[in-house]
Amino acid sequence: MNCSSCNAENDPQELSCRECGKSLARSEEDLQKVDPKSTALIGYAIGGVGFVTLFFVTINLEALTLSSQDYLIPLLLTALGAGIVFYARTLKK
């Protein structure tokens, strides 16, 4: 399938052009589809923020007086990111 904007070749399952990013949706149903690649990237970003935050909380244990609740948000973000990535891998292309 060729993009109507830049004429780049794309897979028929793609929801956006690889070159210019323009939407390749042909119907209302196509607009309702979830892009597995974008969903996985969002999951990696959220999980990465959680992991980095957990890393900094762990490093600063001696400098700060932290409770067990200070680990809660980083762990939840990491778990949420992993869940989103898992969900993205189960989506059909």
Image: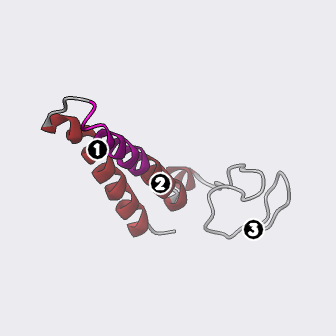
The residue lying at 40 percent from left, 60 percent from top is 85
In the rendered structure, find residue 58 and report the number of the disc placed on it: 1
Colouring rule applied to residues: secondary structure
Query: In the picture shown, does residue 81 fall above or below 70?
Result: below
Residue 87 belongs to the span the image colors magenta? no
User: Mark 3 sits on what residue?
Assistant: 1
* Farthest front residue in view: 62
The CA distance from mark 2 to mark 1 is 29 Å
Query: In terms of sequence position, does the residue under pointer 1 or pointer 3 come before the other?
Result: 3
On the image, the x and y values in percent for residue 33 come to 50, 55
Q: Are marks 2 and 1 in contact (CB under 8 Å)?
A: no
Tell me which segment is drawn in magenta.
46-63
User: Mark 2 sits on what residue?
Assistant: 39
Label 3 sits on what residue type? Met
The CA distance from mark 1 to mark 3 is 49 Å
The residue lying at 72 percent from left, 49 percent from top is 22
